[in-house]
Amino acid sequence: MSSEDTRSYFAWNLEMERVLADVLRDQRNLGNKGDRNWKAVAYSTAAQILSKHFGVHLMADNVKNHFKLWRTWYGIVSDILSQSGFDWDSTKYMITVENEIAWNEYVKSHEEAKRFRFKVIPNWDDIVDLCAKDRATGLGAENALDANDIMSKETNEEEAIHSVSFDLEGSSSATRKNIRPSKSGEKEGMISSMKEVAESLKEFVEVTKKKMENKKKMEIKEVQEAVHEVVSELDNIPNFNGALRHRAIDWLTENLIKFAIIKALPLDEKKDYILSFMP
């Protein structure tokens, strides 16, 4: 595959998105978010940290394109939520429609909104946090060509893997394309779609629960190895000892994402980063 194809079809999962959001927040606090966009160092740092943390080969363009996708999602969903009759369910991570007639009228002029009718977005709070200001300054709305390109790439990613969200309309769109259902058929279709939503949510909860259980079952040996790695990394930092070192050991063993960031930073920046972010 060409480098462009690699950037377009990189498969993200929810855990990677969570880490990316944390890294970008740190980069924003460090001043690497400009008035118009993120600085190149923010994308490259995020790519390095994610690559090392997950054992993948991620490039700055992968991060840049994925944030562009977030910004497109934010632009579409926030516009939907600004309309009367639509709301956000913070427990199911999806929009809710109180007025189906209003929805049908809305999507007539907003074709891209259709695929968000039953879309589950577990990391919506992160997207809002990182994209809301861009939206306010006009950066949230991509031009039509960019939006279509991004949404097309997103569709390819979702078809390739079980992604961070569930597009429940896609599976039956081909079947419905040449069928014009009756009113009773539409009702049955709605019931069927809601059942699919419930099943997808159940699957999402079960996967999340299993991940949490697996973390709790981490063996003592693995914990000891993690602590040893933290101590070894801090030993490399000059003039970093005493109570400050002890606090850093305690903080980093409980915040392995922060530890991954420190490992990726140059030696002369490690101490400053710890002092900046350690409580």
Image: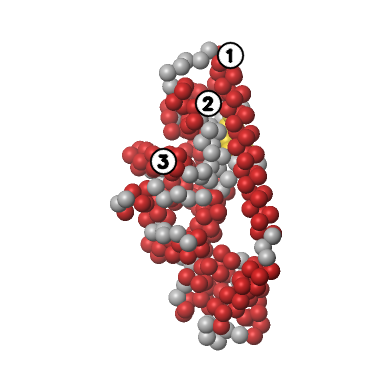
Where 180 sits versus 49, above or below? above
Alpha carbon of mark 3 to alpha carbon of mark 2: how far? 26 Å
The mark closer to the camera, 3 or 1, is: 3
Q: Which residue appears farthest toward the left when viewing the image?
A: 2
Residue nearest the viewer, comparing 276 with 7: 7
Q: In the drawing, does residue 269 fall left or right of residue 89?
A: left
Residue 138 appears at what percent x and percent y?
Answer: 41, 46
Alpha carbon of mark 3 to alpha carbon of mark 1: how far? 33 Å
> Of the residues under marks 3 and 1, which one precedes in the sequence?
3
Which image quarter: residue 257? bottom right
Q: Inspect this view and state whether residue 21 appears.
A: no
> Of the residues under marks 1 and 2, which one precedes in the sequence?
2
Total numbered labels: 3
The mark closer to the camera, 1 or 2, is: 1
Amino acid on which disc 2 is placed:
Trp
Instruction: Please give the residue where the numbered disc 3 appears in the rendered image.
Output: 156
Q: Residues within 10 Å of mark 1 (few under 14, many from 20)?
A: few
Where 76 sits versus 269, above or below? above
Which image quarter: residue 245? bottom right
Amino acid on which disc 3 is placed:
Asn
Disc 3 secondary structure class: helix
Residue 159 appears at what percent x and percent y?
Answer: 45, 39
- Which residue sits at x=62%, y=47%? 207
The mark closer to the camera, 3 or 2, is: 3
Amino acid on which disc 1 is placed:
Ser
Where 230 sits versus 167, above or below? below
Disc 2 secondary structure class: helix
State the quadrant of the C terminus: bottom right
- Which residue sits at x=55%, y=54%? 15
